[in-house]
Image (cartoon, rainbow, N blue to C red):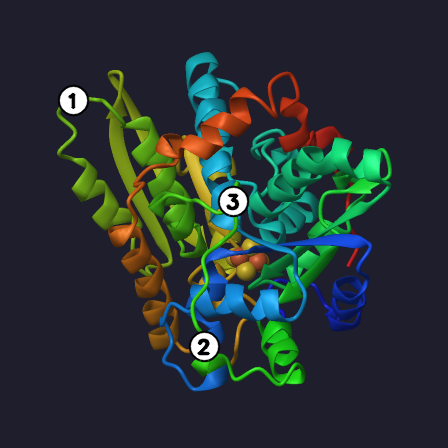
Amino acid sequence: TACPTGAITVKDNRDQFWEAVQNKDKRVVAQIAPAVRVALGERFGLPPGEVTIGKIVSALKMVGVDEVYDTAFAADMTVVEESNEFVERLSNGENLPLFTSCCPGWVKFAENKYPQLMENISSCKSPQQMFGAVVKEYYKEEDNKNNTETIMVSVMPCTAKKAEAAREEFEVNGIRDVDIVITTQELARIIKEAGIVFEELEDESFDMPFGMASGSGVIFGATGGVSEAVVTRLLREKPNHTTKDVIFKSVRGMEDVKEAIFNLDDREVKVAIVHGLKDADELVKKVLSGEKSYDFVEVMACKGGCVAGGGQPAPININMRKERAKGLYKIDRTSFIKSSENNPLVNQIFDELLKDKKELIHVHKKNLQKVES
Ligand code: SF4
């Protein structure tokens, strides 16, 4: 697969995956990113945008994964944490604009080309890494007691997520947040290797406690989704925000650069959304020269966002990007939890597991290193 983000050599991790699920002494836990569910079906003759999450959970269980969770759960955590960080920066005026940190293709690009922006990039780990950190912490005691090990597998639309998971700062006391990353394409091959007839699988639901996500967490997979989720969270309980619909219209869609402006406690907040590194580069130049001024900038390295990531079934045309994004918005429309902070399980994790341990879901930019490749 060609990676549009510059992760030049793409490693196939199917062997590692098979080894893990065949080792009965290990608990294999999988997380599935939002964009995977609207594209994997294409490898089995289904149309782009068709949501196959129930079949993906079934297939992973059949090949030996012990627990299957939703990365959108961690996206909800990211929304809550990144919104808090944003509000704090707005109030003290420091390190604005806040750039999003969930796309490793963008983070690596910024590290190499614009190291002066490191403090502007959110300190929140990406949903993939947050999820791994939380799951490892959740099972830590039990694993120590029983002398077992939890292996975190993530199923991602993205080849750059492999490089992200391997970064040095995502290992704490010898424990990695994420152990194995497989792409949507690799999962399709795994399913075929196992002889599973994917189209005929019965749907299964995610496991608990990390299987419940809001619509906001799911739309992370499309360009504009992170901004929409953060705006939804910031404007919650604020009266007179019939403007929300107008904002959503401006953050959705495939235009190269989108802008949204809204008022938050009498302050005008300016958001920009850019996808594709060429457009991101131009936007950053304008921000640095002072030609443009924003408070929040969402950057996704792939055109269209993760729905069109380098690990997705290819080739991808504009229509497929739109159909896959539509599939995510459809999930959002029908989900019974609309906004991230209303996800009761996310709140429970913040109140209990992460109480006094917030550092588990943050990464400090001083630790980031220039990546040569
Ligand atoms: Fe990966 Fe998504 Fe970034 Fe593309 S936009 S590099 S798929 S995280």
Q: Residue at x 71, y 37 (%)?
A: 139
Name the residue tied to disc 2: 41
In space, the residues marked 3 and 1 are separated at their CA atoms by 34 Å
**Residue 212 image-quadrant placement:** top left
75 vs 151: above or below: above
The answer to the question of whether label 2 and label 1 lie on touching residues, with beta carbons closer than 8 A, is no
In space, the residues marked 2 and 3 are separated at their CA atoms by 24 Å
Query: In which of the image's four quarters is ligand 1 placed?
Result: bottom right
Residue 177 image position (x, y, % from top left):
72, 43
Q: Name the foreground residue: 223 vs 156.
A: 156
| Label whose residue precedes the other's in the sequence (2 or 3) | 2
Q: Name the foreground residue: 48 vs 119.
A: 48
Q: Is residue 22 visible?
A: yes
Q: Is residue 42 visible?
A: no
Local secondary structure at mark 1: loop
Name the residue tied to disc 3: 208
Name the residue tied to disc 1: 239
Tell me if 87 is positioned left or right of 332 in this view: right
Q: Residue at x 75, y 40 (%)?
A: 170
Q: Name the foreground residue: 134 vs 296.
A: 134
Residue 137 image position (x, y, % from top left):
70, 33
Tell me if 15 is positioned left or right of 353 in this view: right
Residue 353 image position (x, y, % from top left):
61, 25
| Label whose residue precedes the other's in the sequence (2 or 1) | 2
Residue 231 image position (x, y, % from top left):
32, 34
